[in-house]
Amino acid sequence: MILLRSALFNLLFFLVTPVFSLLVLFSRPFGFSVSWFWARAWSSLTRGLLRLCCGIRIRIEGREHLPDEPCVVIGKHQSALETIMMPLLVPPYTWVLKRELLHIPFFGWALMALGTIAIRRSSPRDALKQVLVQGRRFLEQGRWIVIFPEGTRTPVGKTGRYQPGGIVLAQKAGVGLLPLAHNAGRCWPRKGFMKYPGTVTLRFLPFIPPDQVASTPRDELLSRIRDQIEQETRRLGG
């Protein structure tokens, strides 16, 4: 039964994603807010399909920690689910992602239309410079920045190497940091066809204001955020 339900979801997901990608793309000349509406609609529809087809419920916690001003969101990366749900979690934002995603037909075109920071992971120094330059520009425009410091999806119960790019950007741009923990990998495993019923909890942790970000050494701040995210992820079963 799980196999059939997963197959149905995957079929519907891969049918609707190109449609909404084109809606994002063709609505871009009418303003970013119009394109963003369609991006959120895609996320909302996917949330409904997950519940209907796979018995996966999405619970969002910690919204009270979201600041009023743009910041850098640093999230755990276990699944495709947390990236798909992100437009429903935070105000309009820019992703830091690997450049290869832009090559995906339809979906990659929509990402380009919305504006992303697409880095080459093979050149870490150039990637960091790109994050700092483009990230500050997007933050000044009022866009949030979402970054997954592990760089790639990690299995449930595992911790990848946290890269400091998000920390450095927040310190250079004078903004705060918002950690995000979740257990998405339990229901939608990385690189997995199967989708398992259950509740996915996406939990924002306490916001770290700009003054604390600026006054805390980079390595200490990175270690602190990593420990917070990983501990909370384990509490959620992720």
Image (cartoon, rainbow, N blue to C red):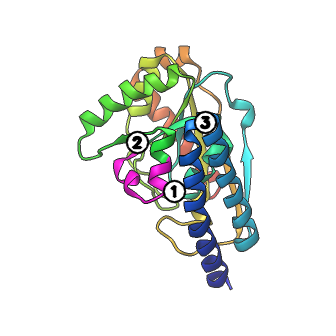
Q: Residue at x 59, y 57 (%)?
A: 81
Image quarter of residue 228: top right
SS for dot 2: loop
- Distance CA(mark 3)–CA(mark 2): 38 Å
Q: Which residues are magenta?
A: 97-110
**Callout 1 environment at 10 Å: few (<14), some (14 to 19), or many (20+)?**
many
- Distance CA(mark 2)–CA(mark 1): 13 Å
Q: Amino acid at mark 1?
A: Gln
**Callout 2 environment at 10 Å: few (<14), some (14 to 19), or many (20+)?**
some
* Residue 162 circle label: 2
Q: Please say if 71 is above or below 3.
A: above
Q: Nearer the viewer, residue 186 or 159?
A: 186
Q: Sequence-wise, which precedes: disc 3 or disc 2?
A: 3
Q: Can I make out residue 204 in this image? A: no
Identify the residue position indicated by label 1 in the image: 78
Residue 224 point in image, percent of width and height: 50, 33
Image quarter of residue 10: bottom right
Horizontal relation, residue 61 to residue 211: left or right:
right
Q: Amino acid at mark 2?
A: Tyr
Confirm whether the magenta stretch covers residue 224.
no
* Residue 30 circle label: 3
Q: Amino acid at mark 3?
A: Phe
Horizontal relation, residue 112 to residue 92: left or right:
left
